[in-house]
Amino acid sequence: MRSATRALSTHLCLSLCFPLLLAAPVTAAVIGTNPPAPPLNAERVAALPTDARAAWSAYLARSKAQLAADRAALAAERQGLATLPPPPEGGHAEKSMPLQQPAAWYATAEALKVADNILSFQTPAGGWGKNQPRDRAPRLKGQDYVADNNFKSAVPGNFDLAADPRWSYVGTIDNDATITEIRFLARVAAQLKGSIGEVYRQSAIKGLNYLLAAQFPNGGWPQVWPLQGGYHDAVTLNDNAVVEVAELMEAAARGEDQLDFLPPDVKARAAAAGQRALQLLLDAQMVVGGRKLLWAQQYDALTLAPVSARNYEPPSLCVGESTGVLVYLMSRPAPSAEIKAAVRSGIAALRELAIKDKAWGKIDDQQGRRLTDKPGAEPVWARYYDVATLKPIFGDRDKSLHDNLDDISLERRNGYAWYGTWPKKALQAYEDWSRRWGSP
């Protein structure tokens, strides 16, 4: 079943995602149009094989019920309010919840201010929104659960345009949200023994239960839960989201990283969730021409075919997210034969796709960032590689796909990491890993 899913993923990507790409001349400036991610809905679930239908139907029902409960809770708070509070302030969230402070710091007034803010913004489902500094004032009665995360200049048809601008990313794992809040609360609770720390422990448990409820039947996680629609419903490897949730589940199962207070049933469910996530990552490795290659940024939850995200993020192999998956797989204490094969083939693909004697950087204000010749420069990699040709691919806000970065708008060329050295981390880790577990 797993190999069939991988074959279907590749077939769908090659035959549906890039129909214009395959027919276009090699030198074409525009090689296709970025298609929207297909919806995860009851109609598609009804078309699944009988043995898979029940689990996905139950998942959709759970999401729908939780969304209704979340909205009802906010509506109840707002009963009788003459004026609604403004949306909460947005900004950089992660640095307001540091996880590397000395243990004693988590009992200070500064840390407790952050923890109390976290408590106040936890959604009824148990998750948190993204891009909110947690060192600010707690949530007000009737206030939105999350900051405004909508793309400010989005137009109809934009993949990132929220159907409801006041209800977007209400519970997410994007940008380390929910994961970081849980880990921070665990550190605070570890310093507050007894009843004084119970409110923080219970909030962390609720957050873990939220993540357990959000896990897809196939082991992945959507970017937003309850489901929001669009690409947010896809299995999201972007920014290492699935990997980081899987790592949190493993820590929870073992009672590590200050999570020793978790009830036995939560630990057991977390252990099972971590195992399902590991298998999902193995299943999601793209196979093309009989070769295992790398991973995509997002996958259709039902078929594991790669799908688009924002207008300029195409269904493709994604080097940055593949690096995160490979480092995670290499951290397994007793890798199976399947894990070893996945690592070796992924590393081989990274080496094959390396771009040598080139540098990525700004030329001037008119030309922006470009890839230029630089003999002897360290290797760089494109962020995205087309599954069919294994050539770099680039997108623009108008959904056009290009085989040449110079052909996209200056705004997108300057405003996105189209090239980078992400794989260095995986390649360095592989040196030690291969000595321990042997080369092929």
Image: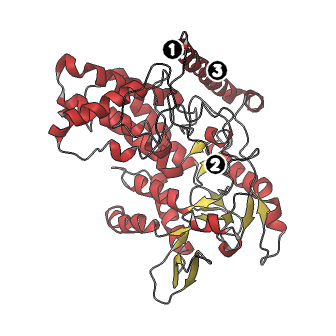
Q: Is mark 2 on a helix, strand or loop?
A: helix
Q: Residue at x 48, y 78 (%)?
A: 379
Residue under label 3, please give it.
Answer: 61
Q: Going by the image, does 381 lie left or right of 26?
A: left
The three-letter amino acid code for the residue at tag 1 is: Glu
In front here: 42 or 115? 115
Q: Within 10 angstroms of label 1, few (less than 14), some, or many (20 or more) residues?
A: few
Q: Within 10 angstroms of label 3, few (less than 14), some, or many (20 or more) residues?
A: few
Instruction: Pick the quarter of the image with the C terminus.
Output: bottom left
Dot in front, 2 or 1: 1
Residue under label 2, please give it.
Answer: 3
The earlier-in-sequence mark between 3 and 1 is 3
Inter-mark Cα distance, 3 to 1: 25 Å
Q: Is mark 1 on a helix, strand or loop?
A: helix
Residue under label 1, please give it.
Answer: 77
Q: Which residue is drawn at 68% across and 28% down?
A: 51
| Residue at the right extreme of this rendering | 23
Q: Which color scheme does this rendered protein use? A: secondary structure
Q: Within 10 angstroms of label 2, few (less than 14), some, or many (20 or more) residues?
A: few
In front here: 264 or 379? 379
Q: Residue 430 carries which label?
A: none
Image x and y of residue 54, in percent: 66, 23
In front here: 283 or 392? 392
Rendering quarter of residue 186: top left
Q: Going by the image, does 268 lie left or right of 148?
A: left
Q: Going by the image, does 108 lie left or right of 321?
A: left
Q: Which residue is drawn at 56% across and 31% down?
A: 225
The three-letter amino acid code for the residue at tag 2 is: Ser
Q: Is mark 3 on a helix, strand or loop?
A: helix
Dot in front, 3 or 1: 1
